[in-house]
Amino acid sequence: MQAIKAFPLDAGLLRDFGVLLMQARRPADALEQFGKIPAQHPAYPLSLVPRALCERETGRTENAFASAQEAIVSTPLDPVGWLLHGSLLVRRGGLEEADRSLRRCLQLAPGFGEAHHFLGECLQRQGRYREAIEHYQKALVQRPQEALNIAQCAELMGSMTTARQYYEKAVSVLPRHVDAHARLLHLLASLCDFPARESVKATIDALLSTPLQPGDVPEPFLLCYQNLSASAYRKVLENYAAQFPAPAAPIHSNDSPRRDGRMHIGYLSADFDNHAISHLVCDLFAAHDRQHFKVSGFSLRPSTAAPVSPADKGFDGFFDLHHLADAEAAALIAREQIDVLIDLGGYTLGARPSILALRPARIQLGWLGFISPHQASWMDGLILDTVVQPPDTDWPFSDRVIHMQSPLLPGVAAPAATGLTRADFGLPADGPLLISLNSTYKLSAGLISAWAAILSACPSANLAVYAPAHAREGISAHWLRSGGDPKRLLFVDKLDHAMHLARMQCCDLMLDAFDYSAGATAMDAVAAGLPNLCLVGDTPAARMSASINHHLGLDRLMATSIPDYIDKAIGIITQPGALLAMRAMLASSGKRLELLNPRRAASEIEAICRDLLQPEVLDDKS
């Protein structure tokens, strides 16, 4: 006769008591009770879901995931187990498996609002915005805060009217939620609705003077150009970085000897496809010294263009990480024994700081994609240059700044002459032609007022401004308020990169933005031989064009104030032959050729890597 196992008589009561403690918001005490239940007891499977909930609540996400995995096997008809499993996979970046688990949850419980939310989040992270909205809408009845997620998806789809409607609904539901206000603020900036933008900015300033609410994690990129105080912006950065806790030990394996004696540089990005960053770096990777360096690329987003081989990208190896969970992606990077991993995304769309937080490389640096401090413990440095962040100025952030001596932006190939004229782009043939090609969120009321003042003093000039349809009403309204002539403000559309450069070649002077200057567009202007007037701002993002002009010796194009910007523009435009002379000087400048040479930036990156890989530097990091 088989012996009957003896269990503690109170094992079932332990489970019930743990649930009561969980409901009383005492998850740590509940876990203590769940931990006393033997794995063989019938109460154990029933404790897995509440155990996983408590582990998630107390930040023990790996334990929560293990419990959720066990729960969907032990109690497969419990929808909450599938919800936990799927939601944790979303957080880990395992989106395909998360999708399956969350859909199984909804098969068992079709009206489960939280499952609709996480499935919406899963779809949103895959770029499937329309499907995501459908699930967020189903969750909206139970969760009014879903308005924020619907707005984000609508904005990413280009449905700006819908996005604004739902952002405004979100801030009414979440009046103290900084992220909701920040997203509305960024949308208003893109729409160039300057009065509404100022009102929301004032609200954010007030909210950031008090502690952030739990779960409120505003994205730093949305606020990096909003002229926040250093202390307020540092709070935003620290709050954002805190959601990616570092593991007890890094997973990199760089301590073993290099197999071929070369240093191995890795580039991590979601923007290797058709993006401003990809145009900047397209010739950089092939320009590295292959005798001493191996170069790999790690892509966070699937290509939407025709497949491009690693050789065409200039990499020795190219790895698609978009389908991998964070731990799997980090493990793959670690197996490649990357000496220095350079993150090209920072806190921008598609970036995954959660991978970097796992420490897949011994040295990890930020460059290009996010011209801002990070306040992240897993980053070992931020590559800027001595104009973008002068070494002798205050830097109230924890990031170590590593300076390039030349401009931080890599060079792009100069376009060949196309023979195209202004008429081919629908632009006036006569008179000085000024142009602005920045994204509209970079524009400001003060900038447009300055443009109106410049054209008022230069009656033969016209101004062409890139603006999608949704921003044109706001720009036109402020232009008229500033006394601008509506006939001399010309809106232009986005073009493919080759035609974009050809249009630049037809113009006389680019007028840069104030708070967030041109980056890739400024390098395009150099490539096209187009002078770019800039204002030297106070933050790294507001000094990129200044760095370029300083390197080229074009101090005449670097204004120190808005009145100086207006005066410099008028002086250049109205001075006979000044524009032609400046363009001729730019075209023949040896500094321009040096700036555009991709080997320039590649060699500076290599020098930084050599310095950081010195034994004493590595010992400090061990």
Image (cartoon, rainbow, N blue to C red):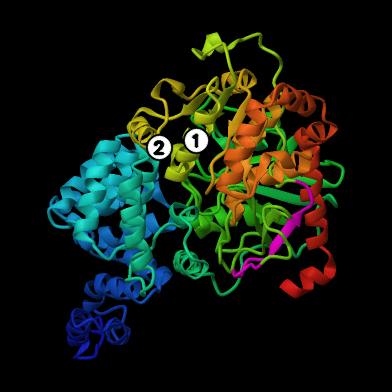
Say which element carries label 2.
loop
In front: 454, or 68? Answer: 454
Picture layout, residue 530 above or below residue 292: above
Split into 4 quadrants, where in the image is the N terminus? bottom left
What residue is rendered at 22% in x and 62% in y?
80
Instruction: Give the quadrant of residue 311.
Output: top right
Query: Is the magenta region chiefly helix, strand or loop?
Result: loop
Q: What's the magenta region?
A: 394-406
Q: Which residue is mark 1?
A: 453
Residue count near mark 2 (Cα–Cα under 10 Å), binned few <14, some 14–19, many ≥20: some
Name which residue lies at 64% across and 51% down.
Answer: 367
Counting every numbered tag in the picture gives 2
Position of residue 287 measured from the top left corner of the image (x, y, whole percent): 78, 36
Q: CA distance from mark 1 to mark 2?
A: 8 Å
Q: Is residue 451 left or right of residue 580?
A: left
Q: Is 587 placed left or right of 521 in the picture?
A: right
Counting from the top left corner in percent of width and height, residue 583 is at 73, 25
Q: Are marks 1 and 2 in contact (CB under 8 Å)?
A: yes
Q: Amino acid at mark 1?
A: Ala
* Residue lying at the far bottom of the rendered structure: 9
Quarter of the view holding residue 511: top right
* Circle 1: element type: helix
Is residue 396 covered in magenta?
yes
| x and y, in percent, of residue 274 in the image | 54, 31
Q: Is residue 509 shown in magenta?
A: no
User: Can residue 492 be seen from the camera position used here?
Assistant: no
**Residue wearing tag 2:** 482
Residue 340 visible in rendering:
yes
* Residue positioned 65% across, 62% down in the render: 252
User: Eyeballing the image, is 6 above or below 287?
Assistant: below
Q: Considering the image in quadrants, where does the C terminus appear?
A: bottom right
The percent position of residue 11, horizontal first and vertical second, equals: 22, 86
